[in-house]
Amino acid sequence: MASSSASRCSDFHFPFQWTSSHRVKGIIIPPDIKPYPQNPCADPKILLCSKSISNREHFLSPMKTLTSFVVLTLLGPLLYLHPAPPALGEVSGGVLEDVRDDLAYAILTTSDLAEAFRPLAEWKTSKGVPAQIFLLDGEGGVLSSYDGRDEPERIHNFLRDLKERSPSLTWLLLGGDSEIIPCRRLYVNWTYQEGSNLEEDTVISDYYYAGLDSSWDLDGDGVYGEEGEQDFGADLYVGRLPVSNLTEAEGAVQKILRYERDPPPGMWAFVRWSPHGQAQRA
């Protein structure tokens, strides 16, 4: 019994916690205040009391930092590469014609905005996330190729087929504001009663495009998301760029590319490269 207890002991004093980090005159200081540290392995009845503040400098080896950066930046994307990705930034012609077998990232937009999203599709594909653009309008577009009571239902039916055609599909980007790609109003009460005010009892949501295992209107009364009809088990991660014209679309895409290719230094970088982060991951 004694050996079992000893095997769980540690040489660290407790409590041990990374409280926070602050930058003072260019120096990062992680305050870690433990007024009554204790070492249970030495003697659980002994508490160490001290009013002094000690300064311990810890620097990562420059070579270790550089090596980690090169591995994560240059070799990381290779882990997600598929065997033979087709051409970059493809625009699907006949909805499900020429759909990539390894499709992971779908961009749904209009013919007027498609060119603005091509650099994003090319970037995603080049870093190992095969992307493809699908057109909402025009001959062979989603709205003209699928049946439905309204545009959201046609889009929903298309996404169900697309997911079945390419099970690897994970992300969906809606390229346009609600006047371009409509949202779906989902009922937020338990059941719909005759005479209910749908404007007050519904919320606008894109989650309708994420849950593809249900039509969200099983009884066909035109009220979506009633109890037992909703599908909150997302099949896709859905995002939207609420742009209304080509200029806005190009600006939004360029901001995304600039951030992904050369992100500004910030807290995420400190957490990733700080001595505390390295020690905790080790």
Image (cartoon, helix red, strand yellow):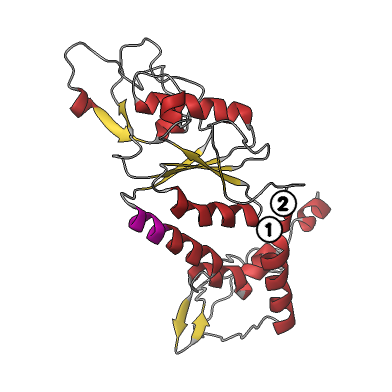
- Judged from the image, the secondary structure of the residue bearing numbered disc 2 is loop
State yes or no: discs 2 and 1 in contact (Cβ < 8 Å): yes
Residue 139, percent from left and from top: 44, 31
Q: Is residue 11 above or below residue 226?
A: below
> Residue type at mark 2?
Leu
Spatial CA span between label 2 and label 1 = 7 Å
> Residue type at mark 1?
Pro
Q: Is residue 245 something that shows in the picture?
A: yes
Residue 77 badge: 1
> Where does label 2 land, which residue?
81
Which residue sits at x=74%, y=60%?
9
Residue that extends furthest to the front in the rendered view of this protein: 139
Circle 2 crowding by C-alpha within 10 Å: few under 14, some 14–19, many from 20 = some
Residue 239, percent from left and from top: 44, 44
Residue 248 on the magenta span:
yes
Q: Is the magenta stretch mostly helix, strand or loop?
A: helix
Which residue sits at x=48%, y=72%?
266
Q: Is residue 247 above or below residue 39?
A: above
Which residue sits at x=68%, y=36%?
101
> Is residue 265 rendered to the left or right of residue 230?
right
Q: Residue 122 versus residue 47: which sits nearer the camera?
A: 122
Say which quadrant the C terminus sits in. bottom right
Q: What segment carries the magenta color?
A: 246-252
